[in-house]
Amino acid sequence: MADVIVFHHAQGLTPGVLAFADELRAAGHRVSTPDLYEGRTFETLQAGIDHAEATGFDVIIGRGHAAVGDVPAGAMYVGFSLGVMPAQHLAQTRTGAGGAVLVSACVPPGHFGPWREGVRLQIHVQEEDELGDVDVAREVSGAVPAAELFLYPGGRHLFADRSLDDYDPAAAALFTQRVLAFLGDVP
């Protein structure tokens, strides 16, 4: 059983993100879903991106840190798109981080400093997703020993959120299976 923190994407803490967290709970994991937007959700990805930019990415990362104040060592951080920023930052900077699952985005290697030794990593992105920065995902996975990079066919950005039009059921099912296997290997 793992302690897992799931950070939402730019549209907010949607029913699809909550459903994914529930799947992890059903597998026996302790899961929290911090709301980086303080209750706001957005109908479109662009509206959510605009809100994130107006709020400030440092503020969003700071909210992510505040949400995990007493999470035990070994915690796993999952970030969907915008949520990759706090997830990746915590995995790279928080002592005792267990690993990260980055979905539909990555922050370039070195941006938050070096990847910590022993911190595990999975990256999931659709191959033709222009917002997903497949090249950055390849670069990050190449810079982190034992990182796993999973590329899915298609170009949907939020492919794993069942509450959005971008949802890709086949890719989302395989993604969830791979994340559950990753979390199942947590010591």
Image (spheres, helix red, strand yellow):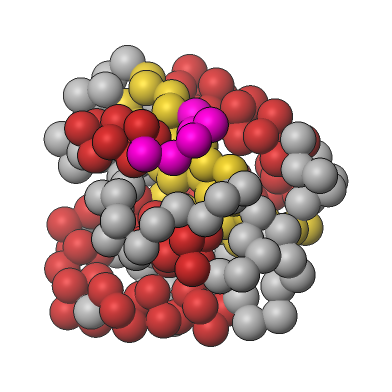
Q: How many numbered dots are placed on residues in this image?
A: 0
Question: Where does the image place residue 98, in percent across and percent down from the top left?
Answer: 65, 54
Looking at the image, which residue is at 36% across and 63% down?
Answer: 113
Taking the image as shown, residue 25 lies to the left or right of residue 67, namely right
Question: Where does the image place residue 141, in percent across and percent down from the top left?
Answer: 39, 34
Q: Which range of residues does the magenta coloring cover?
A: 143-148
Taking the image as shown, residue 153 lies to the left or right of residue 54, namely right
Seen from the viewer's position, the closer of residues 181 and 172 is 181
Judge whether residue 88 can be spotted in this image: no
User: Is residue 145 one of those drawn in magenta?
Assistant: yes
For residue 29, above or below residue 37? above
For residue 115, above or below residue 125? below
User: Is residue 25 one of those drawn in magenta?
Assistant: no
Question: Where does the image place residue 142, in percent across and percent down from the top left?
Answer: 36, 32
Q: Quadrant of residue 69?
A: bottom right
Which quadrant is home to the C terminus?
A: top right
Taking the image as shown, residue 176 lies to the left or right of residue 151, namely right
Q: Quadrant of residue 20?
A: top right
For residue 53, above or below residue 169? below
Question: Where does the image place residue 73, in percent across and percent down from the top left?
Answer: 73, 66
Seen from the viewer's position, the closer of residues 123 and 104 is 123
Looking at the image, which residue is at 61% across and 70% down?
Answer: 95
Judge whether residue 98 can be spotted in this image: yes
The rendered magenta stretch, by its main secondary structure, is classed as loop
Q: Quadrant of residue 9?
A: bottom left
Seen from the viewer's position, the closer of residues 106 and 26 is 106
Seen from the viewer's position, the closer of residues 37 and 134 is 134
